[in-house]
Image (spheres, rainbow, N blue to C red):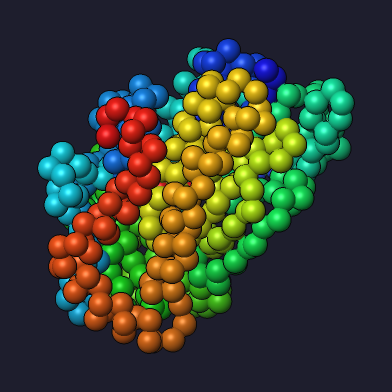
Amino acid sequence: MKIAIAGCGIAGTAAGYLLSQQGHEVTIFEQSEHCGPVGAGILIQPIGQSVLKSLGIYEDIYRQSAPLNSIEALKHTGKRLIRLEYQNLRSDLYGLGVHRGLLFSVLLSLAKQAGTVIRENARIAGYHVSKSGVSLELKSKERTEPFDFIVASDGSRSALRSASGIVHQTVEYEYGALWTTGGCTAVNDRLFQVVEGTKKLAGLLPIGNSECSFFWGLTVAQFENYQQQGIEVWKNEVLELCPLSEELVSRIHSFEELTFTTYRSVSMKSWWADRIVFLGDAAHPTSPHLGQGANLALEDVWTFSECLKQKTEFRSACLLYESLRKNKIHFYQQMTRWLTPFFQSDGFIKGWGRDIFLPVMSQTPLLREQMLKTLCGFKSDWMKSQIPQI
Ligand SMILES: Cc1cc2nc3c(=O)[nH]c(=O)nc-3n(C[C@H](O)[C@H](O)[C@H](O)COP(=O)(O)OP(=O)(O)OC[C@H]3O[C@@H](n4cnc5c(N)ncnc54)[C@H](O)[C@@H]3O)c2cc1C
C-alpha cells in the first residue's frame, strides 16, 4: 500500500520503519524545515524497552543512556514522599533515561534505511478523501498525490484530529514546564523530583553521558512573571528547592536556553476513520506526570503494524488495533488525569492529601505493586503476551 505518515516524531519514524519493512511505500510529511534530534529526556519504561528490543535498536540506545533503579520524590523539607524501586517488582527491571534526540535519530535512520521517504517543510492543514484514495492538504495549499491511508502521528496538537471529524474532548492545562538538558552528575541512578505544595515542582532525569534533563513545573502566568523579573530570580528559586540541580542550572544564562511547554489531554471517541488512523500523542496526549507518552506511542506503532500485517486490509486492521489498545490507553489517560492536579494545580488541599497518602500507599505492598506495574507500563496483558522480552 501507499501510506502517508503525518509528523516525523517518535511515532512517525517508528511507523515509517515498520511499515516500510512490511513492503509498503511510505512517505513521512514533517512541518519542520529539518528533521533533527530535539527535545528533552524521556523515561523509557520496561514496556517501551521491549518495543525497542523488537525493533532491534535497544542495545544501541542503552549504551548511550542511563539505567535508573527508581523514581523518587521529596518534599521541599527533605522528607521523602515516594520512592518506587523497579526491582521490587522484578529483579531485572529498570527505567531507562534517554535523550529524545538520541531515540529520534536512531529511529529516523532505521526508517530511511528501510526506504521511508521524508518530506520536510511540509506543514499539514487537513486531508481529502476521494475515490482514488486520500491526499494530505498542506499549509502551502498543495494537495499531495493520493495514498491508501494516512497514519496521523502529528503529536498533541494534531491538525488532522479536528479535520477527521472524530468526536473528541480536549482539556488544556494551565500548567506546563520549563525544561532543558545539560551536564549534571549529582543524580545518576533515579528520576529525582522535589515538590512544594502543588505550585512548585523540579525534576532531574539522568539521560547518560553525565547529563540530566531538568524540568520545572509552572503556569503560563508564572513564566511571564519570571521573564519580567529576570533569569537570576528564577535560578535562585530553583536552587532553593532543588540544590542538586546547581551544576546544570548555574550554566543557564537566559530563558532562551530553556523550552516552555504546556500540556493538554485529549480523549477521542475513536482512533480511526475512513482512510486515517491516529497513533501516539495525536491519538491520546496527556500531561507527562506519569511519564508514559513515548512508551504508549511506541506500543501504538508496534501494535498497529502487527494488526496490519495480520489483517492486510486497513479497516480490519484498525478495528483490531482499537480493540487491543482501548483498555490500556483509557487506563493510562484516566490515571494521568487523576494524578496531574496532585502535582500541579491551584489550592493546597490536593498537595496536602498527596503528602499524607502517597508515602503510605507506596509502603503498602499490594498498592506498591500496582503502582510499579502502572509505572512499568504493564497494565496490558495483550502486549505482555505478544512481546517475548517482557
Ligand atoms: C516536558 C516533557 C517531558 C516528557 N517526558 C516523558 C517521559 O519521561 N516519558 C515518556 O514516555 N514521555 C514523555 N513525554 C511525552 C513524549 O515526549 C511524547 O508522548 C512523545 O514524544 C509522543 O511522540 P509522538 O511521535 O506521538 O509525537 P511528537 O514526538 O510530538 O511528534 C510529532 C511530530 O509531528 C510534527 N507535526 C506536528 N504538527 C504537524 C503538522 N501540522 N504538519 C506536519 N508535521 C507536524 C511535529 O513537528 C513532530 O515532529 C514528555 C513530554 C514533555 C513535553
Residue at x-position 17% and y-position 54%: 85
Residue 290 position by quadrant: bottom left
Say if residue 52 shows up in the picture: no
Q: Residue at x 67, y 31 (%)?
A: 315
Nearest the eye: 33 or 371: 371
Quarter in which the N terminus is drawn: top right
**In front of the other: 260 or 383:** 383
Task: In this rendered view, identify the residue nearer to me: 28 or 22.
Answer: 22
Answer left or right for 11 relative to 238. Answer: right
Residue 353: % across, % down: 31, 82
Left or right relative to 80: residue 331:
right
Image position of 98 with respect to 149: above or below: below
Quick check: 90 above or below 172? above
| Residue 355 visible from this viewpoint | yes
Q: How many marks?
A: 0
- Please tell me in which quadrant of the rendered image residue 84 appears: bottom left
Q: Nearer the viewer, residue 34 or 173?
A: 173
In the image: residue 184, left or right of residue 338 = left
Give me the residue at 59% from left, 58% from top. 266
Please state, as top left, top right, bottom left or bottom right, where the C terminus lies in the image.
top left
The image quarter containing residue 358 is bottom left
Q: Position of residue 357 (x, y in %)?
A: 25, 77
* 375 to 353, vertically: above or below: above
Q: Position of residue 88 (x, y in %)?
A: 14, 52
Image position of 47 (left or right of 338): left
